[in-house]
Amino acid sequence: MAATAFDEMNGTPDGAAPVRSAYESLRRWLDEKPGEFFDTRRSQAELFFRRVGITFAVYGDNETSERLIPFDIIPRVLTRSEWSFLERGLTQRVRALNAFLADIYGPQDCIKAGIVPGDLVYRNPHYRLEMKDVKVPHDVYVHIAGIDVVRVGENKFHVLEDNARTPSGVSYMLENREVMMRLFPELFSGHRVAPVEDYPDALLKTLRSVAPDGGGRDPVVALLTPGRYNSAYYEHSFLADKLGVELVEAGDLFVEDDVVFMRTTQGPTRVDVIYRRIDDDFLDPLVFRPDSALGVPGLMNAYRSGNVTLANAVGTGISDDKAVYTYMPEIVRFFTGEEPLLENVPTWRCREPGALSHVLANLPDLVVKEVNGSGGYGMLVGPHASRQEIEDFRRKLKHAPDNFIAQPTLSLSTCPTFVASGVAPRHVDLRPFVLSGAREVRIVPGGLTRVALKEGSLVVNSSQGGGTKDTWVLDS
Amino acid sequence: MLSRTADSLFWLSRYTERADFVARILDATIRLATLPQSYSGERNEWDSALESAGDVDLFRSLYGSANEDTVRDFLAFSPANPSSIRNCIETARENARSVRTALTGEMWDDLNCAWLELKNFDNGMGREEFSRFLDWVKRVVLAFDGSAYRTMLRSDAFWFTRLGSALERADNTARILDVKYNLLLPQTERPGGSLDYFQWTTILREVSALTAYHWVYRESIKPWLVADLLILNRQMPRSLANCYEILVRHLDLIADDYGRRGASQRMAAGMQSRLTAAKITEIFDGGLHEFVTDFLADNNKLGHAIAEQYLS
């Protein structure tokens, strides 16, 4: 299967084709430099990440509570025209996601029109009744989206997953670029790489644009983190720093008369926009999980009164649910009136009996995902699974088919990557970050390229041993 | 600034200051312990190191007797001792991690590298290697403090770090005095023997005060002058008087910036004027031990007042 994958550098799988033009000078550079050069640079890169403290925690892994995500120094390159296409497709998709959310928490036209089955929405654990008929500023729900895109051919991109809750990874996009520019300045003078450094600026503009009307006051933005034991804490502090906003924990905030304040050395300061990196369930113990120590009592009332904006909005989980995903092509058509530019991966909904029997009959060839899972946990990759794992999964699937979807194993594109034996192709995906503000959608050119470091592996998640690469959009 | 951020900066500075102090006490103790047995008298220097730098009851609950091995382990490495050097560095780094946005890159770099290197040290090392470890700790704190001083914006974030280190330093100096008060005899009493002399030069050297002593008093070591230097001399960076000068100055800067004064400004100013007015002879008349005990309690109260006013 790996043999049929499209290679980002060499194009066709048989290797007969010449190097794709965007990669030509990169290929020369790889061939010309001696092996030791790369060894030194790779260890310098690792040192850089360790010193800066760019680490993540893996849940259930007590031994090393702070680990590095492996970084590969060979960049992944997209041409400007490939990017322009992606940009249009991503903008269209995120506009549709926002319109869908405004609709299901509002008039519910798409359910009435039979586009999406009602029970899929109403019975979905991520559908938040608390949000029904709540007006959010400018109808924007998903201010920050991370859309996972895979490439399966020269001109063929699929959306693998929409991340509309609290997508992470953007700090890696920025730090990967930083370390590449430090280690290989000569590469950047020879390539016109589109900059990504203005992401924090774009994010801040986006967040400020959706602030509640504060009577001309400059809106105060804060980033809410679960705290330093969270796996993405580094990213939270990194972003707060780049945005120039306070990094707050729940204990730093309190609500009085439906207004949110933070405790400062000079007394209470009003907060207008909260870029929250904690899940819905933990936001407000009065409304959601009463046992949550991470939440701010009264926050939901302040939010529903329109005194504070939460980004992303509460209840966006319904839109990146894997069952709803399967309806995305219809959702895009219904809300934008256009044909979707980015295709979905063909998907079987196991809730439908016909699809279920097909899936059960073809388990060794399919990828089966839990509808509410994330981060590569709780999924079956048929071709790589043992007979036992397949049988275990078959039981789970029969027991609760509604909880699963299945997809063919895609031949994700590969990109040359440093591995123990030298440079070899490894499968990659791409997570661009899409920002939706009051008036415009902003996407910095590029995103986070994740790479599955194990030979033949298709699982790129950092929690499952994936690594990252710098992603270049090249102006020729 | 967030109260929690100020709190972390304050404690971060306290913990780095404490790590330095514990390292210096250990270094001094090793020197004293190299004296021949007949010179070292009845007191065990390892007991006295514990009293200055640790929680004696906690130590007793964890170890048997106080000797080089057990005290070294307790003060430098024990995860059970919140003030062990290892815990100080780890706690400081944890605090730093939670307020990274308030630190400069240099400060974070110093602490994070120290934390990464810390893993290479344990109590298995020999005396010479241990000495190098203590030097390393002192250098880490110097570098961190230097980074703060050289790179931080002069705003409330910087002022809270100064408050933390001055308050901790005053506490540490007072602890040395408290443990050694029986050696600090008033002028009228018989001066200490050669053993006291050795102990005091060692302590002075460890707090970088031996040269200062000679420079200020131009005399041989007299215990009451040692007390004068460490309590009342405003030029001496580690003296209680200088620590309070720093506390008052930075509390005033914060109050001016915020446009509001409170209990901590009043308390610090009161302490400072008492230290300015005090004479070492009067302190001895009232009893050095009583003076130090009261000071430790008041210093602690100021810590609570700062926490109440700004950090919560």
Image (cartoon, rainbow, N blue to C red):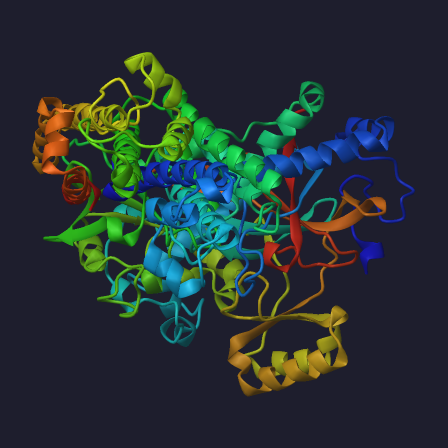
**Image location (x, y in percent) of residue A276:** 35, 50
Closer to the camera in the image, B290 or A62: B290
Name the residue at the right extreme.
A16
Q: Quadrant location of the N terminus of chain B?
A: top left
Q: Is residue B156 visible?
A: yes
- Looking at the image, how many numbered discs can be counted on the residues? 0
Q: Is residue A104 visible?
A: no
At x 22% / y 56%, what residue is drawn? A299
The location of residue A147, given as percent across then percent down, is 53, 50
Q: Is B30 drawn above or below residue A181 in the view shown?
A: below
Viewer-proximal residue, A33 or A76? A33
Position of B68 with respect to A21 (left or right) is left
Residue situated in front as seen by the camera: B174 or A359: B174
Residue pictured at 40% horizontal, 72% vertical: A124
Residue A44, quarter of picture: top right
Percent x, y of residue B201: 39, 28
In front of the other: B153 or A338: B153
Q: Height in image: A164 above or below A443?
A: below
Looking at the image, residue A460 lies above or below residue B179: below
Percent from the top left, x then y, of residue A441? 43, 39
Left or right: where does residue A210 sit relative to residue B151? left
